Structure formats: structure tokens, C-alpha cells
Image (tube, rainbow, N blue to C red):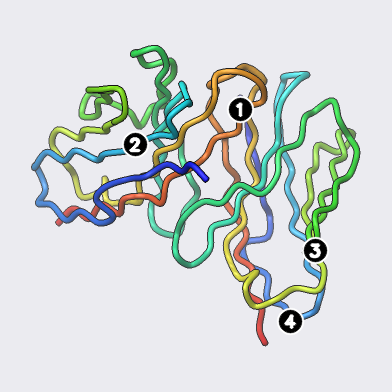
Amino acid sequence: EPEVTQTPSHQVTQMGQEVILRCVPISNHLYFYWYRQILGQKVEFLVSFYNNEISEKSEIFDDQFSVERPDGSNFTLKIRSTKLEDSAMYFCASSEASGVNEQFFGPGTRLTVL
Amino acid sequence: AQKVTQAQTEISVVEKEDVTLDCVYETRDTTYYLFWYKQPPSGELVFLIRRNSFDEQNEISGRYSWNFQKSTSSFNFTITASQVVDSAVYFCALRRKAAGNKLTFGGGTRVLVKP
């Protein structure tokens, strides 16, 4: 069964450093998303991406964040200068373009900012 | 604005007991979708069910059942005869109709099933 994959599973970085989180969505999906979950809290939407552009973003997704689909398979989230409060689990998700299109989530990347 | 409220933060039951998780939502849309996701201790988010706003039929899948009541804006989830493997955090979520829209999650309910 196709699934969303994410790398790395855990990333530790120093405050102020740039990080890139990578995702490979399900191959026939056309909508891509990033969500984050601070430890013990609810899952929060960051950004959605379709047709090579951002279709919606939340207040959390400020200028420090960017997304990219550099090739036909990867979808990346970049945080330019990490802050302590960026420590969270980051989930990538994808969905089909037609029909009800429920979102399927990857296993997540745990980001720890020291 | 959309909002999902899961008033129960944690529920503890003994194996084989039934457990019902409450979900109340707010939206101005007339057409929308509701979801339940399971987050086991390993951390991934597992899709359980989707319900369309125009379909108020209750659904049963094995030991899981869902009660959607549009009149009270609720979408409750019951696990019958709970098992230790059901221990997880369960999230209710809401999405607008159009493709590509974000999921708005509730705060989650942690279910602990004791042997």
C-alpha cells in the first residue's frame, strides 16, 4: 500500500541554524501539506501546496518557513533560522486532487532545537 | 472560522469496557467533512474514518462506531470492547468541502486501556 515517507525521523539542531525536512508524498497525489505538533498538543496546520504554489498558509508559517517541490517526488519544508519554539513533530501529508481526498500522513520528523 | 473541541483530555478504561470519545465542531459551511485519526504511542497519524456533512448515517467498522448528529454539531466515536492496543490519542478533525483544504484538529483525547 502506498504511503507518505519522511526523512529524517529525528533532527537535532542548534538555534539559528537552517533545517530542511523532507517528504515523499504518495505518487498520484497532487495536494501536499505540512502540519506540526508541539509535544502533548494538538496538530496544527502550517501550509498546503498545489500546482507548484502555496494554496493556503497559517499564521505560524511566517517568513522563516518555505516549501518547495524540487523534483517530481520530494516535498520539502525549510526553516531558515530555527528557534527553540520550533521544536515539534512535523507531519507531511498528501491527498488526491479529486473526490473526497482524505489526507494521508507520513510518520513525522521530530525536530529538536537546542 | 472553524473549530473542533474534544472536551475529554484523557479517558482510562479497563480492557473490554466500551469508551466513547466526544467531538463537537463549529463551522459556517453547509458542506464539510469530519474525520477521526488515531495517534498510537509510536507517533504516526492513522486515518480512521471520514464523514460527509450531508450523510448522517451512523457507521460501524468492527469494534469502532461513529455517531454523527448535525443538529448538535457532534461526531462521537465509540470503541466497543476496548483492547490494550486501542491505547492512543484520538483526534477529531474538520475540513471544508473543497479539495486541498486544511484539516482543523481538536485537542485530542488520550485513551488508556488497562489490562
Label 3: which secondary element: loop
Please state the chain letter of the residue tagged with numbered disc 2 in the rendered image. A
* Of marks 1 and 4, the one in the foreground: 1
Tell whether B69 sits left or right of B33.
right
- 3D distance between C-alphas at marks 1 and 3: 25 Å
Residue A14 on image: x %, y %: 9, 51
Q: Which residue is mark 2?
A: A24
Which circle marks residue A101 in the picture?
1
- Please tell me how crowded label 2 is: few (under 14), some (14-19), or many (20+) other residues with Cα within 10 Å: many
Counting the numbered discs, the total is 4
- Please tell me how crowded label 4 is: few (under 14), some (14-19), or many (20+) other residues with Cα within 10 Å: some
For badge 1, the amino acid type reads Asn
Label 4: which secondary element: loop
Residue at the bottom extreme, as displayed: B115
> Which quadrant, please, contains the N terminus of chain B?
top right
Front residue (pair B66, A100): A100
- 3D distance between C-alphas at marks 2 and 3: 33 Å
For badge 4, the amino acid type reads Glu
Q: Earlier in the sequence, mark 3 or mark 4?
A: 4
Residue A75 on image: x %, y %: 30, 30
The answer to whether mark 2 and mark 1 are in CB contact below 8 A is: no
Q: Which residue is mark 4?
A: B15
